[in-house]
Image (cartoon, grey):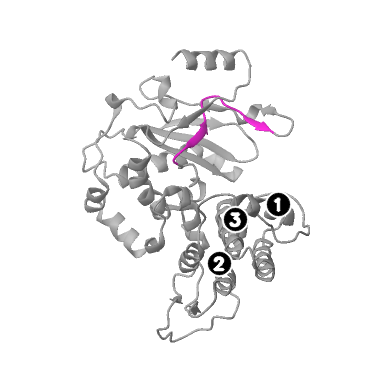
Amino acid sequence: HELLDDIVAQHERGELVAYHEVLLEDRPRCLYFDLDGDVMWSELHPQIVAWLRNFIRWFFSGDSLQWASEHPTPVVLRSGTSTKYSCHVHFPQIQFDDFAHQVEYMKYLLHSLPFALVEDTNGQPIPVLQKVVDRQPYNSFQCMRGAFACKMVMPEGKFVEETSLVPENYLLDDPLTCFAGHVDTRYALPLPSPAALLERNPTLRDFLSNSASKVAPTCPQDAALFDPSFQQPGKQCIDFAGLTDIERFELALEWLHPHRAWQYWSWFRISGVTGRMLREHEDDESAKQKIWDVHCRWSSAYPSFNMQENAELVERSMGRGRLPSIKLLVDLVRFDNPQARIRESTFACRSGSTRERPTGAESALHPTRRDGGAGVAPAPSH
């Protein structure tokens, strides 16, 4: 309370602050969301919060659990930035014991966001929550901005006042409920276990079983990889059988949705696969150059592709102990091409060609990954 009083006092004096809260893996936390999207969503802010609240009540089967009609109550921290829609939404009544407990629910919740559809003025269904919910802030060590915190512009190190996260409300007038890591068990709502959750909500269970959830992530920090907007049509056969690891790497990148190169998390994780490939072929200069050329050909689909930036990220990844394998790429290919037949062994595949480069459907993703122009660099070396 004392720290929060100091933060509020600083804010009231017109001082800019940048306090962050850290959620450690073994500590409790409440359900939280970072909403982020095009500035056009700002006009629908009250409705978006209401839609999110209704979705959460449906997801956890709040009616059958006899939650009060006003529960769960969202606590909202809103950014005033004029360049995009941005806010944090916490649900202090939905509580998790620790990160592992949170993961059990979030892997289902994030994957079911496309089910929440809202009709536009023409009667067309729009998956609004899928478009605005950021799927990345769910790591075992999570750092996030707190109440009144501003973003900082680098390298100047200046706070941007309009990005201050100002609380719109508190739960039961308790200002500590604006912190995701503050858990007061007096506010807790009963939650079903993950298994009971699917039993209580057959609509949710059927949606997850009929979607591409067979390759969905087990950890929510990878949920951004499995965004349904990456899925593209086509009943072709994609044949990995009998290929070398470098050939599999090249073929997998060819069959990913082209806009994956625009998404930061896809770029980050696929750069890890590239780093592992380079490390496994560190004594073969020709193989290393081939791997690097394939990576850059894929990554250059991003409009502001920068060769040096890619080299730096891949080289940093090579210093990490555990890196993703080609299996991750094959899983992404399977997700991006849900109608395709994926052939990894020598069984027969009846239709399609594996050598035609796919053309992805248009998606609503935006090029927000990185800045800079094209450059030239050799394959990174560890």
Of the residues shown, which amino acid type is indicated by label 1?
Answer: Glu
Front residue (pair 98, 160): 98
Q: Position of residue 215 (x, y in %)?
A: 41, 62
- The residue indicated by pointer 3 is 267
Can residue 121 be spotted in the picture? Answer: no
Q: SS of the residue at dot 1? A: helix
In the rendered structure, are the residues bearing label 3 and label 2 in contact, judged by CB atoms less than 8 Å apart?
no
Q: How crowded is mark 1: few (under 14 residues within 10 Å), some or many (20 or more)?
A: some
* 146, above or below 363, in the image: above
Between the residue at mark 1 and the residue at mark 3, the CA separation in whole angstroms equals: 11 Å
Between the residue at mark 3 and the residue at mark 2, the CA separation in whole angstroms equals: 12 Å
Instruction: Please tell me in which quadrant of the rendered image residue 82 appears.
Output: top right
- The residue indicated by pointer 2 is 256
Residue drawn at x 70%, y 61% is 379
In the rendered structure, are the residues bearing label 1 and label 2 in contact, judged by CB atoms less than 8 Å apart?
no
Residue drawn at x 64%, y 65% is 283
State yes or no: residue 200 in magenta. no
Q: What stretch is highlighted in magenta?
A: 140-153
Name the quadrant of the C terminus. bottom right
Q: Where is residue 129 in the image (x, y as percent from the top left)?
A: 46, 48
Residue drawn at x 26%, y 39% is 191
Of the residues shown, which amino acid type is indicated by label 2?
Answer: Leu
> From the viewer's perspective, is 119 left or right of 354?
left
Q: Where is residue 279 in the image (x, y as percent from the top left)?
A: 59, 60
Front residue (pair 229, 51): 229
Q: Nearer the viewer, mark 3 or mark 2?
A: 3
- The residue indicated by pointer 1 is 309
